[in-house]
Amino acid sequence: NLSEKFKLRNKCFKKQYAPLYSARLAAMRPMLEAVARNKWFDVAQVQLSDLHRNKTCVIIGTVFKQMQLKPSILRELSENLNLPPKPERKRYTHQTDTLFLEDETQRISLIGNIETRDAITGTVICAKGRELAGGKFEVDEWSYCGLPAQLTSELGETIEDDKYVAIISGISLGDPKYDPMPLQLFVDLVTGQLGSLKDQTFYSKVVRLIVAGDSLSEHTRDTTSAKQAKYLSNKVKAASISAAQELDDVLTQLVSCIFVDLMPGQFDPASFSLPQQPLHRCIFPQAAQYTSFQNVTNPYEADIDGITFLGTSGQNIRNIQQYTGHTDSTEIGEMTLRCRHIAPTCPDTLGCYPYIEEDPFILRDCPHVYFMGNQKKFSAKMVTGDQGQKTLVVSVPKFSVSHQVVLVNLKDMSCFPVSVATLIGDGKMEHAPPVEEEMEEDDEEGELPDVNVTPDDDIEE
């Protein structure tokens, strides 16, 4: 477990957020200065306060997008605006949005060769251009830091046999429409109680399971009881209690066979702000008795047989989707890697702890696997850096919707989803999506099981 930097030791929420932006810019400025020297070696780098009109230069700062539709508590509480509350939107971008770049001295408006709709607030960039009249900076080119250095790039050389790490997210226990059959089928497959001998041999190679958040459903967050009189709700059992007990039963079955890392998510009984702290062990009285069970933070970083895994429960990706024009979760994940920051929209539109001296979300080392939980669908992409770094970016779908679990092979970094079928009326098992013909040839070689595994042929290189 490499997530010690995400654990909060001394909690104090009385601090302001301005020092967090200052610490982020101070830490990332040397990285961007090196990038600017490499890209535009003949152009001077200046502070915003030292700009000269119509003189080409390079500036470094934090991007801020001023958005008309962005929710604002100050605007809602203003006495001068007697307006009804605005409806919740899926996306808050608007054609009137404007971009600014801020450094330690001041801010300046950005125009030119930079897309306002796709810009991400909180990212630190370097931009080449010139100052124009009216306090605007015309951008010719701009760049992120790029992928950080990677400790080891020769992956899987010390691993002789196939070893799989399974990643599941969005189990959503406690949902009124929840179907327990797919989850139990997956548990039985992993624990060797289901499937043919070939299936059992394959799933015995799953050495660890990462549960990437939202194990409980949003329906377990009942806010109506807090508004009722106590005599009306004193005998009502909270939905989260029964859901947590059911999760404990499921985890107990799993940790008896494999290692399980449990991450908190948006709807789990954990802190709202990032980094979310580990769920308390008392919630899982049965599973917590096993040494193979581990409550971890969100984000979570770990070293598994020399392969570095880094991932979140998906809040950072969904927040960027709301405030930019980006929709593909894998591309957003690649962007956060190239800007060297897991959650750049913290603390503007995504809640986080008010750090003072450091920003733990800055990427110091390049992971080998970067996963994002609770996404709409599975996708994966191998991202390559300028220095030969290779990172597998994986979008893990919500299990309650897709009934899919993602497997990552530590030997060759291959990645594919497992579609867990349900029993249909005639007692047969339906597998979705069907296995393709070329994968049937692989079955003959004994590399894949007979059922339930569907490799993704669309992984981009």
Image (cartoon, helix red, strand yellow):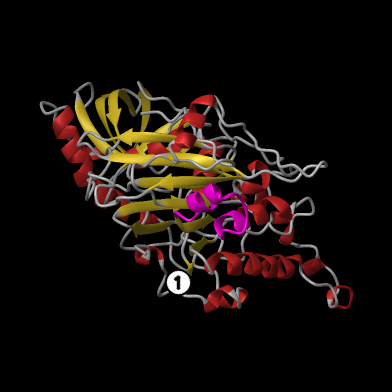
Determine the residue positioned at 37% across, 46% down.
Answer: 369
Report x, y in % for residue 127: 27, 30
- Confirm whether residue 218 shows in the render: yes
Q: Is residue 195 magenta?
A: yes
Report x, y in % for residue 124: 32, 41
Report x, y in % for residue 63: 38, 38
Closer to us: 274 or 254:
254
**Label 1: element kind:** loop
Report x, y in % for residue 98: 46, 30
Determine the residue positioned at 61% across, 46% down.
Answer: 398
Closer to us: 39 or 174:
174
Quadrant where the image shows the C terminus: top left
Q: Residue furthest left?
A: 42
Q: Amino acid at mark 1?
A: Cys
Q: Which residue is mark 1?
A: 12
Determine the residue positioned at 19% across, 37% down.
Answer: 387
Closer to us: 42 or 165:
165
Determine the residue positioned at 38% across, 57% down.
Answer: 301
- Magenta segment boundaries in residue numbering: 187-205
Q: Is residue 398 above or below residue 216?
A: above
- Confirm whether residue 349 shows in the render: no
